[in-house]
Image: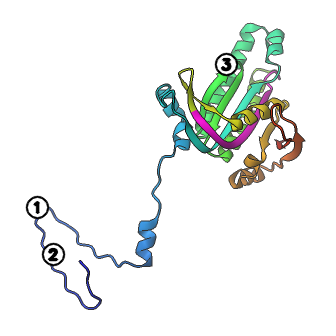
Amino acid sequence: MALRPGPLRLSLDNHSALRVLPTVWIAEAPLNELTGKRKPFLTANRLLTNQTFRDIYRTGTLNIDQRLKITSLTFLFTDLKRSTELYERVGDLVAFDLVKAHFRLLLEIVAAEAGAVVKTIGDAVMATFPTPDRAVKAALRMREAMRELNTEYSRDDLLLKIGIHEGPCLAVTLDERQDYFGQTVNIASRVQNLAVSRAILATGSVVDDAQSSRLLAAAGLKPESRRYALRGIVDELTLYEIP
């Protein structure tokens, strides 16, 4: 009912068997601020980059004919440099142990940074993250983990190349597994191919992200930019090497 301004007496009758707390709200700015705050919700971005979700629902997440458009997702690709030579230098058994230890560390770091491993291809890893700064933090941790692993094995054989890119993509089902498709994925893969040993290469959309910038500044890292021609990409791209 509509009530007129001025003195007002309210009479309330409790017909339930429970105690109740009558409350009067004044409809003005403080109430609007309280009720207008957006409640947190689960986005496709956050859900599909959750490692636990991917582990439990490996298949059947999307119908094979469905295509889910994601406006922003960060991709991180890694690969071991000269992995074939590694098997030649140290032998199959030692190389297998090294590669296995490297995978275990990378998967732990991805999950710890709210990311998810999409797939492994040979000695390479493709992972996704909900935001660029998560991917950058994971990349820095991966690089340090490889240094420690090399020290542990008293050798310098694990040379990890890392590439990061952010942008729109399509979530699809391929080979009974949730995967991603689009130019963003292609660029991320090619960025990793250009990386040299222990280098992290990232695109402008990653390093220009406000949270990524703060993270790199806090770590005392200043990305250096260079123009690169990427296979299959018409225009050259400015990529940033994180030292």
Q: Which amino acid, mark 1?
A: Ala
Residue 100 got which mark? 3
Residue 126: percent from left, percent from top: 67, 29
Residue 98 is inside the magenta segment: no
Quadrant in which residue 22 is drawn: bottom left
Front in this rendered view, residue 108 or 132:
132
Quadrant in which residue 157 is drawn: top right
- Does the magenta stretch mainly form a helix, a strand or a loop? strand
Front in this rendered view, residue 141 or 57:
57
Is disc 1 placed on a helix, strand or loop?
A: loop
Residue 12 got which mark? 2
Residue 97 in sight from this viewpoint: yes
Residue 91: percent from left, percent from top: 78, 8
* Marked residue nearer the N-terminal end (3 or 2): 2
Q: Which amino acid, mark 3?
A: Lys
Q: How many marks?
A: 3
